[in-house]
Amino acid sequence: MRTRLVATAAALAVLPLALTTAPADGAAGTLPGTTCPVFPADSWWHADVSALPVHARSAQWLAHMSPDRRLHPDFGPSFLQTPVDYGIPITVVGRTHKKVAVRFQYSAESDRVRYPLGKDTRIEGGRSSTGDRHAIVVDRSTCRLYETFATRQDKNGRWQAGSGAVWKLRSNALRPQGWTSADAAGLPVLPGLLRYDEVRRGRVDHAIRFTTDVTDRSHLWPARHDAGSVSDRSYPPMGARFRLSASFPISSYRKDTQVVLRAMKRYGLVLADNGQPWFFQGTRDARWRSAFLDDLKRIPASAFVAVDTASLQVRPNSARVRRP
């Protein structure tokens, strides 16, 4: 993972995000630039986990996840350390966008269709990056989500990627059991990204994607895949959901940070990939402000517990949840 330079005083002297009135509870918002939901309102991503029981292995998992650390927003200004800012960008395209063949390293577990990639496709870290190079593309005409990992276009213009997955944003269908996606957990990346627009409007209505360094070779519904380095159930599995304690005080935080903290109490975090402990992901967006990001870095990992989401499951092959 990347490290960042300390922001200058001038960069920190910024105003909070302008918050607007939150929308009515229960509805999954649409992705900006589209009329598409970021998966249905009854998706596991939008499930309220604030009243779920603590998982029986919560203490064991947390003990192996550097609980003395603080959370780290893995998005925001790069301060010229990279050609582009940190974060995972989203590209929105229309019906007429050309679709291309992609050669996959993990072709047996990738959706082998044509993907709407082109010169306009924004790639995590930039096209010369040696990092994860996620590409997240939404076709607003069909509400299809196309995600690739280790995305690259060779000198002959041909597209290559480590893996690729296609999702219907109006569906709760999951990938086949055992299949990866653009994420180690076999889950979509998009719904777990913190977005500027939702923080600005005053409500984040979904779980947030995060990473840790050592994981078990197992996964929990609705995750479909794992890439752990140990076979030890005292280490966290892919798909594990973590919730910020309801008693954690938030009044000393900025108003925009409080929006995120409330989401972490209600929807939590989801372990979606291997990486630096407690790095959580957001979109690449020039509007993220340094003071907000620094405030997020004050959140202690020790204030989280793992929750048991088994009671939410309706069917093993669907991300739809039981709702009160």
Image (cartoon, grey):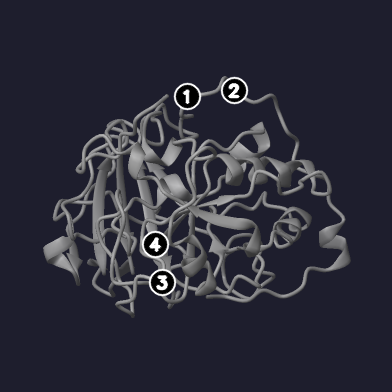
Q: Residues within 10 Å of mark 3 (few under 14, many from 20)?
A: many
Q: Nearer the viewer, mark 3 or mark 4?
A: 3
Who comes first in sequence, dot 3 or dot 4?
4
Q: Is residue 15 left or right of residue 273?
A: right
Pointer 3 with pointer 4, Cβ within 8 A: no
Gap in Å between the C-alphas at discs 2 and 4? 30 Å
| Res 251 visible | yes
Gap in Å between the C-alphas at discs 1 and 2? 8 Å
Q: Nearer the viewer, residue 60 or 128?
A: 60
Q: Nearer the viewer, residue 199 or 276?
A: 276
Which mark is on residue 235? 3
Who comes first in sequence, dot 3 or dot 2?
2
Q: Residues within 10 Å of mark 2 (few under 14, many from 20)?
A: few
Q: Nearer the viewer, residue 146 or 116?
A: 146
| Residue at (62, 63) in percent of width and height | 301
Q: Is residue 247 above or below residue 39?
A: below
Per the image, label 4 sits on a secondary structure element best described as: loop
The residue carrying mark 1 is: 27
Gap in Å between the C-alphas at discs 1 and 4? 27 Å
Amino acid at pointer 4: His
Which quadrant of the view contains residue 107?
Answer: bottom left
Who comes first in sequence, dot 3 or dot 1?
1
Which mark is on residue 23? 2
Gap in Å between the C-alphas at discs 3 and 1? 34 Å
Residue 287: percent from left, percent from top: 67, 49
Pointer 1 with pointer 2, Cβ within 8 A: yes
Tell me how many marks there are: 4
Pointer 1 with pointer 4, Cβ within 8 A: no
| Residue at (62, 34) in percent of width and height | 203
Q: Residues within 10 Å of mark 1 (few under 14, many from 20)?
A: few
Per the image, label 3 sits on a secondary structure element best described as: loop
Q: Quadrant of the C terminus?
A: top left
